[in-house]
Image: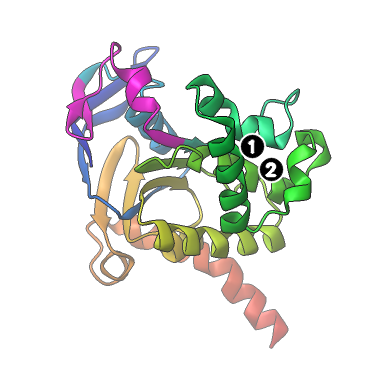
């Protein structure tokens, strides 16, 4: 579904993505994870054509991504930002249906799709007439997910979509997203720094560090057969706070 072939990206003379190749299979959720500055968000933006590689090529739907076809290919994918990226002067319904109206989809189709997506994401229809400032963080992200799904894309890109939420809303939306991904069978590429989130949502996990892929594997293999000591270090670092808390509770 997505193919990256020897990608390099340079910012201000610094190479942030180093000769990176990756194949992302159809109908799987692939999570890009690693410490801050490892290049995971940059890699996601390269896949969607918001940034351009200095070397190498990227293919979506077996078509090489170019500046000429980027807009057309972007209409076939959905994208969710960490803060939702909603337009503050538009209601939730207007945000969700923006691209559908731009593409001249019939009003009846748009209204029917809004109802379907409210049911899918467990969002009350009463929310649709509100503006982003009137929504909670969890509601904003559900609206952003609905907007990404509006045109029924084959690929979803999510850049730390739960990162700004409090723990309670984060867990609830995480569970709903997992159910949605399983039900729809989309190809999903998601960025996170949270290993628990990656474990819950990801079929495959891409561990990154310093613009390189250290390991592209299942969670069980990351834990049992790490390809680099940093893989184990990263996993254990996220376990330690919870172990400490468990000791205090006991």
Q: Where does label 2 land, which residue?
A: 140
Closer-to-camera residue (67/243)? 67
Residue name at image x 81 percent, y 35 percent: 133
Image coords of residue 181 (percent x, y): 43, 57
* Image: 21 above or below 165: above
Q: Quadrant of the C terminus?
A: bottom right
The image quadrant that residue 50 belongs to is: top left
Q: Residues within 10 Å of mark 1 (few under 14, many from 20)?
A: some
The quarter of the picture where residue 20 lies is: top left
- Determine contact: label 1, label 2, CB under 8 Å: yes
Nearest-to-viewer mark from 1 and 2: 2
Residue 71 position, x and y percent, is 37, 18
Vertical comparison of 13 with 165: above or below: above
Residue 150 placement, left or right of 217 = right
Confirm whether the magenta stretch covers residue 55. no
**Above or below, 93 relative to 202:** above
Q: Does the magenta portion include 63?
A: yes
Q: 147 or 229: nearer the eye?
A: 147
Place residue 233 in its image quadrant. Answer: bottom left
Residue occupying the point 58% across, 45% down: 112
Q: Which residue has dot 1 on it?
A: 83
Q: Identify the magenta region.
A: 56-78
39 up-or-down from 232: above or below: above
């Amino acid at each position: 579904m997505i193919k990256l072939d020897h990608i390099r990206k340079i910012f201000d003379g610094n190479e942030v993505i180093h000769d990176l190749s990756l194949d992302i299979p159809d109908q799987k959720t692939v999570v890009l994870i690693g410490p801050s500055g490892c290049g995971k968000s940059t890699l996601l933006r390269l896949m969607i054509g918001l940034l351009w590689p200095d070397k190498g090529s990227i293919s979506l739907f077996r078509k090489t991504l170019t500046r000429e076809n980027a807009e057309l290919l972007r209409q076939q994918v959905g994208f969710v930002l960490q803060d939702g990226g909603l337009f503050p002067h538009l209601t939730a319904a207007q945000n969700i249906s923006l691209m559908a109206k731009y593409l001249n989809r019939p009003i009846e189709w748009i209204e029917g799709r809004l109802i379907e997506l409210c049911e899918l994401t467990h969002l009350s229809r009463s929310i649709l007439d509100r503006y982003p400032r009137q929504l909670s963080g969890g509601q904003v992200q559900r609206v952003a997910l609905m907007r990404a799904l509006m045109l029924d894309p084959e690929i979803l890109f999510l850049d730390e979509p739960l990162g700004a939420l409090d723990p309670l809303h984060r867990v609830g939306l995480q569970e709903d997203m997992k159910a949605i991904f399983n039900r729809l069978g989309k190809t999903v590429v998601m960025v996170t720094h949270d290993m628990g989130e990656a474990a819950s949502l990801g079929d495959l996990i891409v561990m990154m560090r310093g613009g390189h892929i250290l390991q592209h594997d299942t969670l069980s293999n990351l834990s049992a057969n790490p390809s680099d000591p940093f893989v184990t270090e990263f996993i254990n670092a996220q376990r330690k706070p919870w172990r400490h808390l468990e000791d205090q509770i006991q």
